Image (cartoon, rainbow, N blue to C red):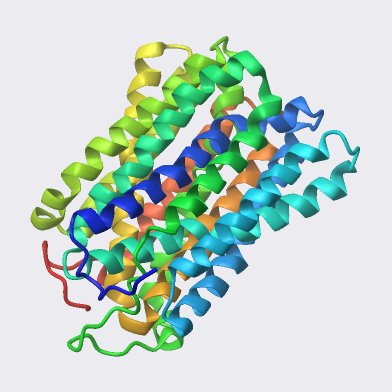
Amino acid sequence: MSVAPAGQGGAGSLNPIRLGYFAFFLGLGIYLPYFSPYLIAQGFGPDTVGAMLAMVMAAKIVAPPLLGWAVDHSGRVVVWLIMAAAISALLAAGLGLLVGLNAGLLGWMLLLTLFGFFWQPLLSQLDVTALRLTGSAPERYPALRAWGSVGFIVASVGLGALIDRIGLAAVPWLMAATLVGLAVVLWRVPEPGLPRDPGTRAVSIRARLREPAMLGFFAGSFLINLAHGVYYAFFSVHLAELGYSATAIGLLWALGVVAEIMLFFLLPRLRNRFAPLGLLLIAIVLMAVRWLLIGYQADVLGWLLFAQLLHAASFGMTHAVCVWVIDHQFPGRAHARGQAILSAASYGGGAALGLYLAGLLWGRVEPGIAFAAMTVASLLAFGLMLVSRRVVCWSPGAREVI
């Protein structure tokens, strides 16, 4: 792997990172729609499934900051990504072997935690790699990230039909195969090294994390991801109980990601015309509406289709704006750790608690009430982002750190 100066990558040099996003989200497109049904098929109840999924996410609290520290101190990101992808592939295959070993809940929990530890840091450091390769043109990031959405669609539609034919037992093996593919693709990604921008001032991570507005931003990000808990854990189960087939469920997941792709290609224009705070607040409101529609109108196809289109806001817009905020607030040698802290606090802690709460809610209350609880979490996130607007808001198109 050759070392390329940050921001020097041309269109050709960005092709491997596009494929890297595609491969990672190909696996995620198997995990999100089909892993909880896979666990239920192994005889685990909703409470246990929620706890098991939470263990995978909880690893994100610890693992991304550790990998971010290693990346920032070594100046190398791709080599760490290859190692994490390869180990994740082996552990995913191990999940497929557990079925025949009668390992018990403890064995499942242990292996899921190890899998989460190596799998969860991959996305935040793929983002770091992409942002370093684009350098002074971070508006190119959404178009790169859109390739991940394409991978998710291929998985949820094409592999959904395959799982319909061969059964849920294939789920961990398909995940392992995508992670092997990711490790292979990453060998072709140029090592960008640390970002070199003499105009960027040094940042003390500890000092930044003591700022009330920054803490409010992280708390809001935490709640945004917590609010996806019932969706990620039981959306497929909810639709199956309403009579939708696995193929139809895969298509509905894919519809949301198609909307996300369309948004990613619009984001550079939106970034240059609107302040991030406005984009984020609108996205959170639409997210709150989405959970109510899924909870109470999922049996009406038209409303369900509209709710899935809102995935562009609830995930696509919130993710992109939060990544941009961290890119502004944690420059230079704090870059990888900043993205890792976001990953740990929001996609780790928030998602883990959301999945755990989903397991507690599902089966105890009506689906509508479970999704309405996620709406409440969304509105709390709206309030936190509003009071933390100093961190989130800067002039449209601006790049300076504030």
Answer with the quarter of the image where residue 260 lies. Answer: top left
Q: Position of residue 81 (x, y in %)?
A: 50, 63
**For residue 386, side relative to residue 204 (left or right):** left
Q: Position of residue 323 (x, y in %)?
A: 33, 61
Task: Residue at 55% x, 36% y: name it.
Answer: 32
Task: Residue at 56% x, 17% y: name it.
Answer: 246
Q: Is residue 220 visible?
A: no
**For residue 181, side relative to residue 308 (left or right):** right
44 vs 391, nearest the viewer? 44
Answer with the quarter of the image where residue 362 lies. Answer: top right
Q: Position of residue 368 (x, y in %)?
A: 54, 26
Answer with the quarter of the image where residue 286 lies. Answer: top left
The quarter of the image holding the C terminus is bottom left
Return the residue found at the far left. 273
**Picture mark count:** 0
**For residue 339, side relative to residue 361 (left or right):** left
Q: Is residue 270 above or below residue 328?
A: above
74 vs 145, nearest the viewer? 74
Q: Is residue 254 above or below residue 272?
A: above
Q: Position of residue 142 (x, y in %)?
A: 25, 50
136 vs 381, nearest the viewer? 136
Q: Is residue 86 above or below residue 231?
A: below
**For residue 251, side relative to residue 120 (left or right):** left
Task: Residue at 35% x, 13% y: name it.
Answer: 302
287 vs 149, nearest the viewer? 149
Q: Is residue 80 visible?
A: yes
The quarter of the image holding the N terminus is bottom left
